[in-house]
Image: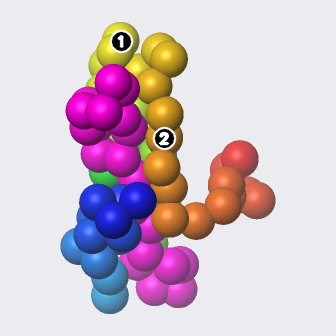
């Protein structure tokens, strides 16, 4: 979760009025993907992290700094 929080900080300031969000995807204790919400209206951190993980995402765990979006899901 610390890594997800660190990625959220990368996007801080550019996401207003939305909160900064970070995400890491972990498989067998290894981070296989990460992402952050880069700017307001941009792709969600979760989608970026899933794309970065590729097929390895199956069976992995996702750590996100915010609950799922009520607009996108």
Q: Quadrant of residue 7?
A: bottom left
* Residue 40, position as x, y percentages in the image: 44, 72
Q: Mark 2: which secondary structure?
A: strand
Q: Quadrant of residue 31?
A: top left
Kindly tell me whether residue 25 is visible in this rendering.
yes
* Residue 24, position as x, y percentages in the image: 36, 47
Query: Label 1 belongs to which residue?
Result: 55
* Residue 64, position as x, y percentages in the image: 50, 55
Q: Earlier in the sequence, mark 2 or mark 1?
A: 1
The residue shown at (29%, 45%) is 34
Whether residue 28 is in magenta: the answer is yes
**Is 49 located above or below residue 28 in the figure?**
below
Give, as a single range, the part of the protein colored magenta.
Answer: 15-34
The residue shown at (40%, 53%) is 23
Whether residue 62 is in magenta: the answer is no
**Is 35 located above or below residue 3 in the figure?**
above
Q: Nearer the viewer, residue 20 or 61?
A: 61
**Is 31 located above or below residue 12 in the figure?**
above
Q: Quadrant of residue 3?
A: bottom left
The residue shown at (49%, 34%) is 61
**Is 23 located above or below residue 39 in the figure?**
above
Query: Label 2 belongs to which residue?
Result: 62
* Residue 11, position as x, y percentages in the image: 29, 73
Check disc 2: other Cα within 10 Å, few if <14, some if 14-19, many if 20+: some
- Observer-side mark, 2 or 1, equals 2
The residue shown at (50%, 17%) is 59
Q: Mark 1: which secondary structure?
A: helix
Horizontal side of 63 relative to 11 (left or right) equals right
């Amino acid at each position: 979760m610390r890594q997800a929080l660190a990625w959220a900080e990368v996007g801080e300031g550019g996401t207003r009025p939305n909160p900064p969000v970070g995400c890491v995807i972990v498989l067998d204790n290894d981070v296989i993907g990460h992402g952050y919400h880069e700017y307001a209206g941009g792709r969600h951190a979760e989608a970026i992290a899933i794309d970065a993980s590729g097929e390895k995402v199956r069976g992995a765990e996702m750590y996100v700094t915010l609950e799922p979006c009520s607009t996108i899901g």
